[in-house]
């Protein structure tokens, strides 16, 4: 299992662009919204498991992440517990505390 995580981490680092940081994160909540485009999740790029002013709001823009994001949503709805992840991301222009996750996997 550790080897798999290592390989995924190395692959992710190799595929990331320079302007997309790689960070440990914790999904701390979900906004299910009233439509598929309205939903998103709350992510801390720290070890904090509470939603607070430092929490980022994430919308999924990339079709290749839909399956992973949907699985995290299902898991969070079932367990109501934080989900520990590694993410690459970029800021959303003109939005405070909004980021776009470009890659994500469990840690």
Image (cartoon, helix red, strand yellow):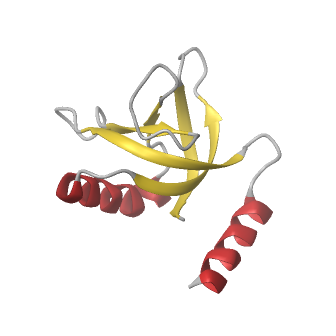
Picture quadrant where residue 92 is located: top right
The relative height of residue 11 versus residue 71 in the rendered view (above or below) is below
Q: Which residue is located at x 42 percent, y 41 percent?
A: 49
In the rendered image, which quarter is residue 70 located in? bottom left
Q: Residue at x 32, y 40 (%)?
A: 29
- Residue 39 horizontal/vertical position (percent): 29, 37
Q: Quadrant of the C terminus?
A: bottom right
Give residue 66's position: percent from left, percent from top: 39, 56
In depth, the one of 102 and 82 nearer the eye is 82
Q: Residue at x 61, y 21 (%)?
A: 93
Residue 31: % across, % down: 27, 35
Q: Position of residue 105 (x, y in %)?
A: 52, 63
Question: Where 98 sits versus 43, above or below?
Answer: above
- Residue 53 to residue 15: above or below: above
State the residue lying farthest toward the right: 18
Residue at 62%, 82% (x, y): give it.
Answer: 2
């Amino acid at each position: 299992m550790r080897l798999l995580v290592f390989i995924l981490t190395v692959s992710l680092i190799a595929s990331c662009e320079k302007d997309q940081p790689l960070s440990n994160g914790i999904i701390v909540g979900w906004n299910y919204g009233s439509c598929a485009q309205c939903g998103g999740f709350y992510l801390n790029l720290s070890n904090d498991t509470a939603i607070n002013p430092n929490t980022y709001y994430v919308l999924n823009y990339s079709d290749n992440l839909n399956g992973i994001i949907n699985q995290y949503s299902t898991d969070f709805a079932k367990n109501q517990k934080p989900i520990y992840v590694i993410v690459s991301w970029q800021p959303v222009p003109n939005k405070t505390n909004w980021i776009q996750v470009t890659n994500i996997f469990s840690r």
